Image: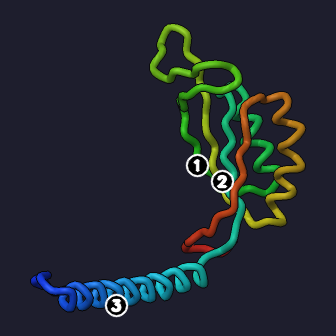
C-alpha cells in the first residue's frame, strides 16, 4: 500500500520511486491474472455491425436467419454521416431511418453469413463492419 512520504532527501525520493514501482508491478500482475481468467472463460467470435435503411431491415433479418444467426440486437433510428449524406434521426419532415443490427458468431458461421451478406449488401446499400471479439455468455453457441 502506498504511504505518504516526506520527500526532502534523495534517499526518500528513491524510496518513494521504489515503492511506486512495486505497487505498479503488483497491480500489473493482478491485471494479467484477471485478464487471463476472462479470456479462458470467453468464446472467440466475430462481431458484425450492419447498418442499412429500415426498408431493407426485414430482408436483412431473414438473410441472417437463413444463415443460422439466432440472436441479434437492433438499434433503430440510427443517425450519422455516410456515403448517402447526413442521416438525422430527429428530422420528422424528411425521415431517413437507418437501423444498426449487431450480432456475433463463431468464425465458421461468420464465413457463411459473409458469403450470403456480400451480394445482398449491394442491393441494401449501407455498411457491414466485422471485428474480432470475445464473448462472455451464459450459454454456449
Residue 103 image label: 2
What residue is rendered at 60% in x and 73% in y?
Answer: 139
Compute the Cα span from label 1 to label 2. 6 Å
What residue is rendered at 43% in x and 83% in y?
Answer: 28
Residue 22 image label: 3
Residue 87 drawn above or below residue 73: above
Apparent side of residue 53 relative to residue 64 in the rendered image (left or right): left
Residue 110 image label: none
**Could you say whether the residue bearing mark 3 is in a helix, strand or loop?**
helix
Compute the Cα span from label 3 to label 2. 42 Å
Give percent across and percent down for residue 1. 22, 89
Q: Is residue 58 visible?
A: yes
Compute the Cα span from label 1 to label 3. 44 Å
Mark 1 and mark 2 lie on one chain; the one further toward the N terminus is: 1
Q: Mark 1: few, some, or many residues within 10 Å (few <14, many ≥20)?
A: few
Which residue, given by chain and number where applicable, does mark 1 sit on? 73
State which quarter of the image contains the C terminus.
bottom right
Q: In this rendered view, identify the residue nearer to me: 114 or 132.
A: 132
Mark 1 and mark 3 lie on one chain; the one further toward the N terminus is: 3
Of badges 1 and 3, nearer the viewer stands 3
Mark 3 and mark 2 lie on one chain; the one further toward the N terminus is: 3
Residue 109 drawn above or below residue 75: below
Q: Mark 2: few, some, or many residues within 10 Å (few <14, many ≥20)?
A: some
What residue is rendered at 71% in x and 61% in y?
Answer: 46
Apparent side of residue 13 relative to residue 95 in the rendered image (left or right): left
Quadrant of the image occupied by residue 5: bottom left
Q: Is residue 1 visible?
A: no
Give percent across and percent down for residue 63. 80, 44
What residue is rendered at 71% in x and 35% in y?
Answer: 58
Amino acid at each position: 500500500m502506498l504511504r505518504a512520504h516526506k520527500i526532502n532527501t534523495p534517499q526518500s525520493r528513491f524510496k518513494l520511486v521504489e515503492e511506486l514501482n512495486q505497487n505498479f508491478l503488483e497491480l500489473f500482475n493482478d491485471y494479467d491474472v484477471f485478464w487471463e481468467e476472462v479470456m479462458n472463460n470467453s468464446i472467440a467470435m466475430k462481431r458484425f455491425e450492419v447498418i442499412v435503411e429500415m426498408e431493407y431491415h426485414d430482408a436483412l433479418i431473414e438473410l441472417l436467419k437463413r444463415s443460422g444467426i439466432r440472436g441479434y440486437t437492433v438499434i433503430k433510428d440510427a443517425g450519422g454521416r455516410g456515403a448517402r449524406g447526413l442521416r438525422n434521426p430527429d428530422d420528422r419532415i424528411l425521415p431517413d431511418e437507418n437501423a444498426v443490427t449487431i450480432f456475433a458468431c463463431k468464425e465458421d458461421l461468420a464465413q457463411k453469413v459473409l458469403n450470403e451478406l456480400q451480394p445482398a449488401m449491394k442491393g441494401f446499400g449501407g455498411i457491414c463492419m466485422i471485428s474480432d471479439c470475445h464473448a462472455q455468455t451464459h450459454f454456449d453457441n
